[in-house]
Image (cartoon, grey):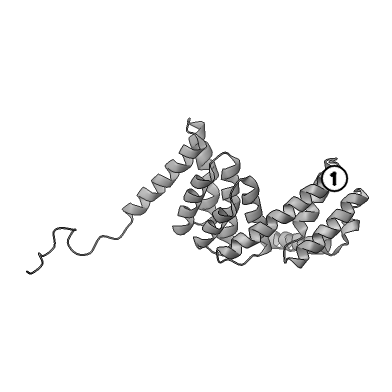
Amino acid sequence: MKAIMSLVAAIVVASSLAAQQPVAERLRGAAPQVVSAVEQTVADALARGLPSEPLIQKAIEGTAKGAAPEGVASAIRALLDRMTVAAAALRDGGAPASAPAIEAASFALSAGLSQPDVSRLTRQGAPAHALEVALQVAGTLAASGVPAAQVVELVGQALEAGASPDRLLALPAQVQAAIARGATPAAAAAGLARAAEARGRRHDPPRRGPPPGRGRPSQP
């Protein structure tokens, strides 16, 4: 455990030191057009209260892959716009727009969910870490072909039931297993949602009082 904590601390320190380096230094070897675009986009992100690290990492990734400078510049501007929408969706759902939540919501948007979808999932109510996992899971499900409506139903149902991050993370594998058995992505997600709803009904507390229609007749 001590070794793990030391490793985590080292990673945090390394990330912090990297973030303090000038953008141009971190993008050493990138085209001047890319460096200029990243510097401007990072400034815009900070002015909007958005995380800047995903933008820098996007530029580093694109440069490493040999993408054209104009393509890298376009990609980081698109990411900035998507993070802006993600932050708005989180706030509309009543959650703080933290950097991890913004990144998770941005991923969900890139996979096909809409701003109202993200807001709806956010409103389901969950601890911050569970919400971030839920949005990552939602994005993974959408990327695998599950329609947005089924994604929101399945993940939202899990959030309302108080599912742990581990249970949320298991959803994509369960959907993939159903797809492997011949179900469509939509049918696989809908089947899991129905099963979860049935389990919830079995665990409902017993109804108090007589069943409807069997109570004491009203007095005339």
Give the vertical position of 78 relative to 190 (above or below): below
Relative depth, front residue between 163 and 53: 53
Relative depth, front residue between 83 and 163: 83
Relative depth, front residue between 126 and 212: 212
Q: Residue furthest front?
A: 220
> Residue 88: x, y in percent?
63, 62
Q: Which quadrant is the N terminus positioned in?
A: bottom right
> Residue 94: x, y in percent?
55, 66
**Count of numbered tags:** 1
Residue at 40 percent across and 45 percent down: it is 194
Q: Which residue is mark 1?
A: 70
Taking 41 as reference, is 164 left or right? left
Q: Residues within 10 Å of mark 1 (few under 14, many from 20)?
A: few
Give the vertical position of 147 relative to 211 (above or below): above
Q: Which of the 4 image quarters holds residue 82?
A: bottom right
Q: Which quadrant is the C terminus positioned in?
A: bottom left
Residue at 85 percent across and 45 percent down: it is 70
Q: Amino acid at mark 1?
A: Glu
> Residue 110: x, y in percent?
65, 48
Q: Residue furthest bottom?
A: 219
Q: Residue furthest top?
A: 182
Residue at 79 percent across and 64 percent down: it is 16
> Residue 73: x, y in percent?
82, 49
Residue at 73 percent across and 65 percent down: it is 48
Q: Residue furthest left?
A: 220
Give the vertical position of 65 relative to 197 (above or below): above
Provide the secondary structure element on which disc 1 rests.
helix
